[in-house]
Image (cartoon, grey):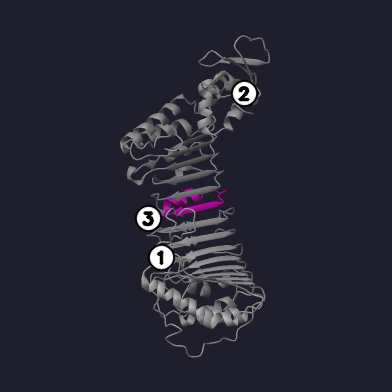
Amino acid sequence: MHHMSMERQPDRLRRRAQTTYGLVASRDNNKVSPCQQEADSQGCVAQIPRLPEDIWCYIHSLMPMRSAARAACVSRAFLRSWRCHPNLTFSARTLRSNKKEYEDDDIARDFCSKVDQILKRHSGIGVKKLNIQMCEGYNGYLDSWLQVAVKSGIEELSLKIPMIAKYSFPCSLLSNGSGDSIRYLHFTGCSFRPTTELGCLRSLTKLHLYHVSFTGDELGCLLSNSFALEVLGIRYCDGIGCLKVPCTLQCLRYLEVLGCCKLEMIESKAPNIFGFDYEGKRIQLSLGETLQMKELRLSFSGAVHYVCVELPSSMPNLKVATVSSRREINTPLLHSKYLHLKSLTILLCAATFPPAYDYFSLVSFFDGCPSLETLVLDVSQYEMEHVSIFTDPSGLRKMQGQQHHKMKTVKILGFTSAKSLVELTCHIVESMTSLECLTLETYQSSSRCFEPADKSNKCSPLPIHVLKEAQRGLLAIRMYIEPKVPAMVKLHVVETCRRCH
């Protein structure tokens, strides 16, 4: 159901709008019994259906917050329901506090004034979702705002606070039953210090902590009492040294840990994790029972070697893997196989990837993945120091491995003239009998002229040595790889933009 806009406008436009929304307006007729009457600032009386207040509240709850606030300005029915509006989102964007003529302090003061006025008029009853994206400064208001809105029945709470504010979330707000209904918690930029007094968050299914200060023990107090938790995301939290995920988290399906520089160990005993995402330094990973693991993303130096040596036997049902590394030792033979792995992305990107690394050693990894259908290999590097095929054009190595009958798509990005990379590509062409599409792309600019977001309509510049290596890579494709590509395979060669370089 729509509400009627009562903004100032000519009568003709007003009547058209009122007809469109199915409402009747009249300056004289006030005898329509099924409706209640309300007047705007010009004295125009609107006939609004008489509905139970809970119906108006429901209608109001379906409107975006700004639209709901506007409706409350012109309708007493909506004003009453606005005072218990369930979805509150406060940000510079929703409150239009980002005016260019304002100084930063003025923006923050304007933002806080508006939020304070709204919450003082709000009953605090029925809030389901509270999202506060705080401007810098004035964090002294937060406690009083949270006292109003965080009560029994709230389901989602999101706080994004500049780290300079040094705000500590009052965990006591979630105790004594107030946190029983919480399904989603998202904190950015604050301190979060849960203790055993917090109690059980029985409905919590998603927890996201970004740039938040806490210790492993403090997080453990929360996790041990969050039996319904399904998603746990931790990003750039420098206070945690050890993450322990208890076996009581039977519902946990996805675990993400990114950029926690002091973290030394992750120990998970949750038995039903479906996806795991880790990025950082090499640490001790103990993932326990991982029979349910289907998706894996790892990013640290030596990640390819780790995936080949330490994981295959513990993740037999893995289907999608992304492995990223800036330094590697040669890939060893796999002692066991990823029998169900269908999609593999390997990112070996660095300013200069160690020239001792042998790309051809990846053959053993591919042989350990007999169900592989899609392969993406990114070997982009700013300065290639591997031995070029043109420096040593002697016989190319071949490996008598198994043939792949399921591989359909292969894409190699940042292609260079490195001899071991040419050998690997030739092996792919010759051993993957089901191959349908092969894409080879030389080094590309970070922004390209055909991308809509690039208003300059020109590729970002590349130094001469990068362009020369891209040309050598293109020549290697034409000389050594293209002649070996079967006729039924579509070969796409993407070279550096000629128009801009």
Indicate whether 147 appears above or below 36. below
**First reached walking from the N terminus: tag 3 or tag 1:** 3
Q: Amino acid at mark 2?
A: Arg
> Is any atom of residue 246 visible in this view?
no
- Could you give the CA–CA distance between mark 2 and mark 3, rounded to whole angstroms? 59 Å
Q: Secondary structure at mark 3?
A: loop
Q: Earlier in the sequence, mark 2 or mark 3?
A: 2
Q: Work out whether 56 lies above or below 354.
A: above
For label 1, the crowd category at 10 Å Cα-Cα, with few meaning under 14, some 14 to 19 and many 20 or more, is some
Which of the two marks, 2 or 3, is nearer to us in this view?
2
- Is there CB contact under 8 Å for labels 3 and 1? no
Say whether residue 487 is left or right of residue 423.
Answer: right
Badge 3 is on which residue? 238
Q: Position of residue 30 (x, y in %)?
A: 63, 10
Q: Residues within 10 Å of mark 2 (few under 14, many from 20)?
A: few
Q: Furthest residue to the bottom? A: 394
> Which is more toward the observer, 110 or 129?
110
Callout 3 environment at 10 Å: few (<14), some (14 to 19), or many (20+)? some
**Where is mark 1, residue-wise?**
281
Tell me where residue 341 appears, x and y as whole percent: 61, 69
Q: Amino acid at mark 1?
A: Lys
| Gap in angstroms between the C-alphas marked 3 and 1 | 13 Å
> Within the magenta stretch, is there residue 337?
no
Q: Amino acid at mark 3?
A: Asp
Label 2: which secondary element: helix
Q: Is residue 395 left or right of residue 467?
A: right
Q: Which residues are magenta?
A: 216-239
The residue that disc 2 covers is 16
Q: Is residue 230 visible from the viewing direction of this image?
A: yes
Above or below 270: residue 74: above
- Residue 206 in picture, x, y percent from top left: 53, 48
